[in-house]
Amino acid sequence: MAPMACSQAYVSILMLLLYSSSFVSGGKLLVVPMDGSHWLSMQSILNQLKKNGHEIVVVAPEINMHIKASDDVYTLKSYPVPFTQEEMDISIKEFGNDNFQELPFLVRFFRTIERMKQTNAMFLAACTHLLYNQELMSYIKESKFDALFTDPMMPCGQIVADYFGIPSVFFLRGIPCGFDFEAAQCPRPPSYVPRGMTGNSDHMTFAQRVKNMLFHLAEYFLCSFVYSPYASLASEFLQRDLSLTELLSHGSIWLMRMDFVAEYPRPLMPNIIIIGGVNCAWKKPLSQEFEAIVNSSGEHGIVVFSLGSMVSEIPMKKAMEIAEAFGTIPQTVLWRYTGETPPNLAKNTKLVKWLPQNDLLAHPKARAFITHAGSHGVYEGICNAVPMVLMPLFGDQMDNAKRMESRGAGVTLNVVDMTSKDLSDALKAVIYDKKYKENIQRLSALHLDRPIEPLDLAVHWVEFVMKHKGAPHLRPAAHDLNWIQYHSIDVIAFLLAAVLLALFISLKCCLFCCRKCCCKSGRMSKKSKSKSH
Amino acid sequence: MAPMACSQAYVSILMLLLYSSSFVSGGKLLVVPMDGSHWLSMQSILNQLKKNGHEIVVVAPEINMHIKASDDVYTLKSYPVPFTQEEMDISIKEFGNDNFQELPFLVRFFRTIERMKQTNAMFLAACTHLLYNQELMSYIKESKFDALFTDPMMPCGQIVADYFGIPSVFFLRGIPCGFDFEAAQCPRPPSYVPRGMTGNSDHMTFAQRVKNMLFHLAEYFLCSFVYSPYASLASEFLQRDLSLTELLSHGSIWLMRMDFVAEYPRPLMPNIIIIGGVNCAWKKPLSQEFEAIVNSSGEHGIVVFSLGSMVSEIPMKKAMEIAEAFGTIPQTVLWRYTGETPPNLAKNTKLVKWLPQNDLLAHPKARAFITHAGSHGVYEGICNAVPMVLMPLFGDQMDNAKRMESRGAGVTLNVVDMTSKDLSDALKAVIYDKKYKENIQRLSALHLDRPIEPLDLAVHWVEFVMKHKGAPHLRPAAHDLNWIQYHSIDVIAFLLAAVLLALFISLKCCLFCCRKCCCKSGRMSKKSKSKSH
């Protein structure tokens, strides 16, 4: 048996070496990003992955907002799309302007749907042009990537992953209408997990729970106009019928930009890793220009104002109202704004085309943050413990704002209705009423007291999927059940039927016995009667 | 406004200092441990907490198995209990012996229940003597602990925590009958989360799902005889009616000794932190005695055999069968055994009263591990990538063994039925059939590829709860709902009623309209008829 034991020992050593050394030379990662702020926060992870020695290829449409070539972090492979930069810029600008218009609810609702259809048509066209770009697809095939890293809000990346059998890691804030949790088979009881856009918290009255259930039931129809074209495209391209949730169910790891200081506690699946605040990791020293502005603000400090990467211009009337409000506070205001300068701009207000938001908020002189309540901004506010004035515009921003306000860390304003005085009052409140600062400091302390930094966690799981070719041990068996099986409806029906059958048989037996007894006693009494007669 | 801004700045600095420095001097931790192997793995966390500068007080009954005074890690406060060391030792020995007796199923079932009642009576008596020990309770009150660390399988610690309002951290393998997940409000769909003792995996046939559902429905009654006395004791002591799950629902953090390389993927709540394999962290170099035995084993290496901290003696007949099997393999066998030496013991088998299991398994010469499939042993097998022969005895051990076998990392034997040849064959299989080693190496690689060590994770969360006085931001709102509300049954009933009412009214309206029309046309036709007459 000695040779067997010997060969066994060799195999063990060989396998250990294999596991420990397979990544010394680095892996190959394909990235299919989502544009906008999603891309900006994804970059911090790519930077770290590059430092760890991996080769990164980013695939993006030629026409885009922020995805530009990189000297040293990744190779950009662009593909042509059937729209121009101008068309895209106009679309974004119009989308931004819509948020400032006073419109009746229904008009706003249908206009938003129309805009979303337009934007979605662009994304879908880009996706189609990627999938049917033979040169690029051949390149991907030949490159033999270890993993694909994508934001599934735009499900194009997963179609590519599925086509080539590459394990995928998702990086997302969320997918509207709960498609993310549905695809991950993650329970989300409507009794305490508020649905998007309801304005509900996790503690709901009966009426709010009814509203939550109605939104839950309507979710599928609400978002299908955005996502059903992707399901059709995927079915056509992969040559098998599949829904969006089926497509996304094959994601190995879901890196979700959420944290329970800002979200309500809810169940998670083992392959959902929460990395809220990952965008705070990207820190740089302030440039001389900004350092000078901040230092000149004196003891009053600064207020940072940005409506996100998509909205940098606003209608003049609104801009003037805002400028007027800024004139009433002693702080220096840094306003990210690319439109025409409002004529009433006060001396304390500096307009800038772009601002290093996280670095400014990290400065001890930051007193307040006026934000559109996008998730990145909200987490930067939390990381740096800066109280917020929240002006939600679209998407999940209403919910983000609601959560911050409910935790006493900010004041929410309706950007359409608000007056100059409302904004001035809100700013004075968050700056001078101690409770806002105390609440955001409490949230910040909870958020930052973590066993591992979200950036390291994200990088770990991307590398895990690259190394182990996925994470099948984290995939729940629920994916192999249909709706009836998952909810045990067949089992409950069977058990109920069995109980009813048993009851029925018992009842019949009892009746039969009773009848027998009665008949007997009847006959007996008849007999005795006849005898007595 | 300058003085306001100034005072604001002072408050900020003060709060930041408060958050960052409050733990420089260390916190105070009260530990109410569970005896047996549970205590052994808890100690590694206490060691680390002590190193981090915290003051630790362990409260334990005077009569116990392993909880002894410590020189430097913690202060032991013992309290008298109404049983003797001898009574406890006999109870444990009889419990161990029962596992080796050939008994019909029902006899075994009722004997197990009887034994559990006996053991439980001891734990309950100990708990009552703790709660009503005025001196000790006054000490706890005066000591003002920052947190309480306990294994809720014996829920006494949480009664103390609740009484004094101390936030608690749970450290557990699990509570039988799913009381742990129920108390944490963690969903566990019976369609793919196998219930204990069913032998089911996460992929079940219809019949297995029916069995799983029946076990799920029976769980409450199966375990109530163990836990309802604790609920009564808690209700009496805390002077308010509460169930076991209500009592445990106040645990701030659940540190669960599980990992998905050995468990089936299932939902988790944000305050459930998995730390499977935490016991592997406790490593020491081998003593000279063991080092010598291991080194003398030559190229064949060693086999480690232990049936856990509770079972160190077995009936002579079984011991002789086992000794015979060991004589058929060339490896040196290290057997933890305190009984009479079997007369047929082969030269390659060394009997020892206690063995450093994890350190022996970590040695490159470890070829196989014969274990009772207790969770600690199984995780030490996985950490060190040693294939296993599993001989489950009681509790969750059948399920642990089933999982390892289903992953091809070991062979399960029924300790009562197995012959000497069965054991010999199983040992040869796991040592010489490459697939067992490959599978356990794969599991080990997945298990060890983690962003943070389970020990650090456990220590972090204990410190988190001490520092922040709990973790209320991780407590799901589900705790504030009753069963009907949680499952939205009231909402569904209301919506169904509304739909039915709407349908009924529509139908009535339609019928009314139809009748009107018919009457009209009837009258019309009558009129026209009368006209035509």
Image (cartoon, coloured by chain):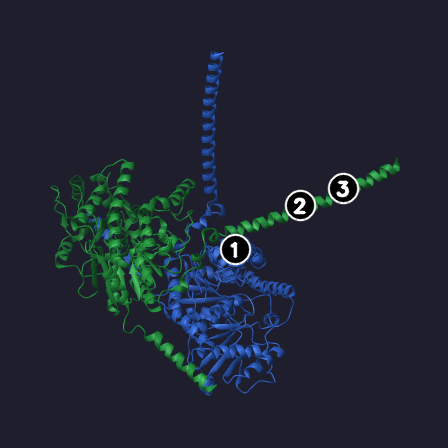
Chain colours: A green, B blue
The C terminus of chain A sits in image quarter = top right
Have a look at marks 2 and 1 and say if they share a chain.
no
Quickly name the residue at label 3.
A518
Residue B275 placement (x, y as % from top left): 42, 66
Quickly name the residue at label 2.
A507
Q: Which mark is residue A346?
A: none
Residue B277 placement (x, y as % from top left): 43, 69
Tell me the subunit letter for badge 2: A
Question: A393 or B440, which lies in front?
Answer: B440
Please identify, in this view, whether the residue under mark 3 or under mark 1 is nearer the observer: 3
Tell me the subunit letter for badge 1: B
B207 w.r.t. A321: above or below: below
Say left or right for B183 vs A369: right
Have a look at marks 3 and 1 and say if they share a chain.
no
Count of picture labels: 3
B257 w.r.t. A107: above or below: below
Residue B134 placement (x, y as % from top left): 52, 60
